[in-house]
Image: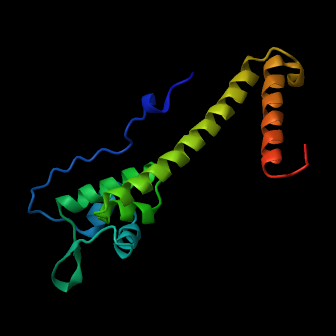
Amino acid sequence: MRASIASLDIRPMLRLHVGMKSSETLSIGEVAGHFGLATHVLRHWETMGLLAPARATGGRRRYGRSDLYRVAGILLAKEAGLALADIRDILTTADLEKRREITRRHRDELVRRIEEMRAALNLIEGGLACGYEDITECPHYQSLVADRMACTYRENEQHGSSAP
């Protein structure tokens, strides 16, 4: 199963269905419950500059509709593997080039990880399809091992190592 990065079918894991009026606010406990989070997570995000809920009398946090969308956006970015500091920078910077640099860096890391996972899947699928009693005699396995040896040899030459 080969698919280009652009055609990966990734379904959103988060749905935001908020049936609240634009002027209505929710407590930290209600928001945490809505998203399945602990309240300390929302407080931590606030200290990191990711959230800035309004304060009611007595200093209690009150979250409006825009705050809920912000929480949903943070969760989506976390599901994409972004660190909280990068999420904060992406959400708060007005510098388009800085935002693009962060997302490019993350994209490059994701592409690298996807390639590693494809190679791992190729090995596993090859193992499942192998009919040999001794997998080391399987031509597919031998090909993968030979490719790995060649790759390791090239990496060692680049770094000046004499190890095979």
Along the viewing direction, whichever of 73 and 147 lies nearer the viewer: 147
Residue visible at 44% across and 66% down? 85
Residue visible at 78% across and 30% down? 147
Is 75 situated above or below 138?
below
Q: Quadrant of residue 47?
A: bottom left
Q: Can residue 81 be seen in this view?
A: no
Relative image position of residue 109 (x, y in whole percent): 55, 48
Describe residue 5's horizontal placement relative to residue 150 as left or right. left
Q: In which quarter of the image is residue 13?
A: top left
Q: Give the total number of marks visible in the rendering.
A: 0
Q: Which residue lies furthest to the bottom in this view?
A: 58
The quarter of the picture where the C terminus appears is: top right
Relative image position of residue 97 (x, y in whole percent): 36, 57
Relative image position of residue 121 (x, y in whole percent): 65, 30
Along the viewing direction, whichever of 104 and 121 lies nearer the viewer: 104
Is 7 situated above or below 99?
above
Residue visible at 43% across and 56% down? 102
Describe residue 126's horizontal placement relative to residue 117 as left or right. right
The quarter of the picture where the N terminus appears is: top right
Q: In which quarter of the image is residue 38?
A: bottom left
Describe residue 95's horizontal placement relative to residue 121 as left or right. left
Relative image position of residue 91 (x, y in whole percent): 32, 61
Q: Can residue 73 be seen in this view?
A: yes
Along the viewing direction, whichever of 141 and 27 lies nearer the viewer: 141
Identify the coloring: rainbow
